Amino acid sequence: MSEELERLALKLERGVGRRGFLGTLSAASATLVAAIFGFAQKSEALVVACICCTLCVRPGACENCACTWSWTCCPPGKAQFSRTCGECYRPGVACNGGCRGVFCSFCSQNNVLCS
């Protein structure tokens, strides 16, 4: 049985780069934790990709946000600059990383190289 698992792991390793696999694994883990504890999910609204950011709505110039939720990410590949991703919320809505109450998203390049 362990030989079969080892062969499967080698196939996965060849088919998916280390960074891609770890990114998928971390996203799956975060989804599992969110499901267990009942946190808001990105599936509540339209999900938009911007480089390495997964956003609730198409990115734009966000103004007059009651609050923002932001994070950084690194695109796959060598010598890539990190990105700042974020959601802008309406007043009176929980600023918790979910998509409810988001009226604007942002995705911008930083001047920091990913390691």
Image (cartoon, rainbow, N blue to C red):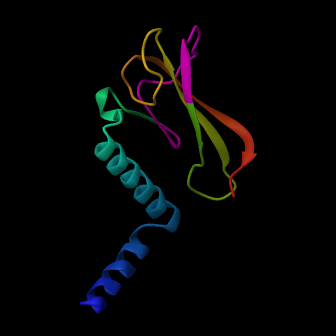
Question: Does residue 56 show up magenta in the picture?
Answer: yes
Residue in the picture at 35% in, 43% down? 34
Residue 39 sits in quarter: top left
Residue in the picture at 37% in, 73% down? 12
Residue positioned most to the right:
111
Residue positioned most to the left:
1
Residue 108 location (% of width, % of height): 63, 31
Q: Is residue 99 left or right of residue 108?
A: left
Residue range corresponding to the magenta coloring: 50-69
Residue 33 location (% of width, % of height): 36, 49
Q: Is residue 114 left or right of residue 38?
A: right
Residue 96 location (% of width, % of height): 45, 28
Residue 106 location (% of width, % of height): 55, 26
Q: Quadrant of the N terminus?
A: bottom left
Establish if 90 lies above or below 35: above
Residue 83 sits in quarter: top right
Question: Does residue 53 show up magenta in the picture?
Answer: yes
Residue in the picture at 30% in, 83% down? 5
Establish if 2 lies above or below 112: below
Residue positioned most to the front:
37
Establish if 56 lies above or below 5: above
Looking at the magenta stretch, what is its main secondary structure?
loop
Q: Is residue 66 left or right of residue 38?
A: right
